[in-house]
Image (cartoon, coloured by chain):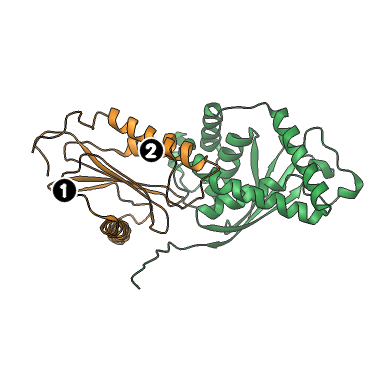
Amino acid sequence: STVGGCRMIYALYIFNRTGSCIHFSEWHRTRPVPNAEQRDQEFKLMAGFLYSLKQFITTLSTKKENDSLICYKTNKYKLHYYETATGQRLAITTDLTVPDMRDELQKLYSAFFVEYVIKDPLYTPNTVISNPLFKENLDKWIKKLPAYATQPPYS
Amino acid sequence: KQALARQPEVMSSSKPYARLGDVAFDKMEKINAELLTMTYGALVTQLIKDYQDVGMVNQELEKMGYNIGCRLVDEFLAKSNVDSCATFQETALVIAKVAFKMFLGVNCDVTSQSSDGRRFDLYFKDNPLTQFVELPPKCADLDYSNILCGVVRGALQMVQFVSEVKLTKSELKGDTGTGIRVTIKEVLKESYKDDDE
């Protein structure tokens, strides 16, 4: 649930080209924590949904070339999306007051994903990211963003 | 640049890409070129000692390049700020003017391209890999810079292009520069694995 006027970043999903979730982080979760199986279902649903949404957008697009999903919003949250030509898909959910996060997602990709994951010789491409440096640095950076509120929302 | 905007059909101008290449090159962390030359030379020498067969060494270099290319493409996309390519002509220019400049520091040109765009030739001089190198007679068939072919193939694979990349000219075999021919065989469609089916 959201609180009026409180900026917040809720969760980050990273999917690979075939739709597997290779990374998930969340902050400020107010709903009950799901178990591993429910988690998996959530990821599958999210991946499938984003894929269908993209197909849908391209079909309906008036311009036909390179039209892509940027973000969608509901009356409770916003989802910002960034996809690379290599099929890495980043989706971040935030509260409604957060403006466009495309630049942040681009930065996330180049400064964190490329530097800590792609360049990690111990990482097998397309598998779940387990590099602690990636998680720590990502977490620190997210928490410093203006979109991230320092105080948890009162509920 | 204004003139270019008014003539969208003149796709072959490479100036904006050359600029992107220069900017990206400036931002990249640099190492000593001779260090690369020596390290690569040591690697190839060791491969020849291990395999004893030039054909196998060529293959191995290509494979190593492929693995590098698969990862390098993400760094390329992240740091070069290129938009998606609308045509194969653009793809060729991006590889030559931006990627080769950014990672190898060389000024590479697209010297020819088939009418459908799928086959094109890249050419550059002063290949940092081949500096100081001489091929002995028993290695006359060695594709010394084959790692570069693998890198291009790996990178293209990750953006859904299945390709064949071959070394066509080499400074070590009497040519004035390095030539690489890229042939795009297949464009893969987006596939999505669905466990429920």
Residue lying at 29% horizontally and 46% vertically, measured from the top left? A70
Q: Is residue B126 visible?
A: no
Residue named by callout 2: A135
Q: Mark 1 Cα within 10 Å, few/some/many (few <14, many 20+)? A: few
Name the kind of residue labelled 2 in the image: Lys
Q: Position of residue B154 (x, y in %)?
A: 58, 51
Residue lying at 50% horizontally and 50% vertically, measured from the top left? A125
Residue at mark 1: chain: A
Q: Residue furthest front?
A: A35
Numbered mark located on residue A57 in the image: none
Residue at mark 2: chain: A
Q: How many callouts does the rendering have?
A: 2
Q: Quadrant of residue A51?
A: bottom left
Question: Observer-nearest residue: B81 or B50?
Answer: B50
Looking at the figure, which quarter contains the C terminus of chain A?
top left
Q: Position of residue B13 (x, y in %)?
A: 55, 41
Describe residue B193's horizontal placement relative to residue B125 as left or right.
left
State the separation of the CA atoms marked 1 and 2: 22 Å
**Same-chain status of marks 1 and 2:** yes
Helix, strand or loop at label 1? It is: loop
Name the kind of residue labelled 1 in the image: Arg
Question: Observer-nearest residue: B18 or A69?
Answer: A69
Q: Chain A appears what colour?
A: orange
Q: Mark 2 Cα within 10 Å, few/some/many (few <14, many 20+)? A: some
Q: Kindly indicate which chain is depicted in green in the rendered structure.
A: B
Describe residue A42's horizontal placement relative to residue B114 as left or right.
left
Helix, strand or loop at label 2? It is: helix
Circles 1 and 2: CB atoms closer than 8 Å: no
Residue named by callout 1: A31
Question: Observer-nearest residue: B174 or A120?
Answer: A120
Q: Is residue A38 visible?
A: yes
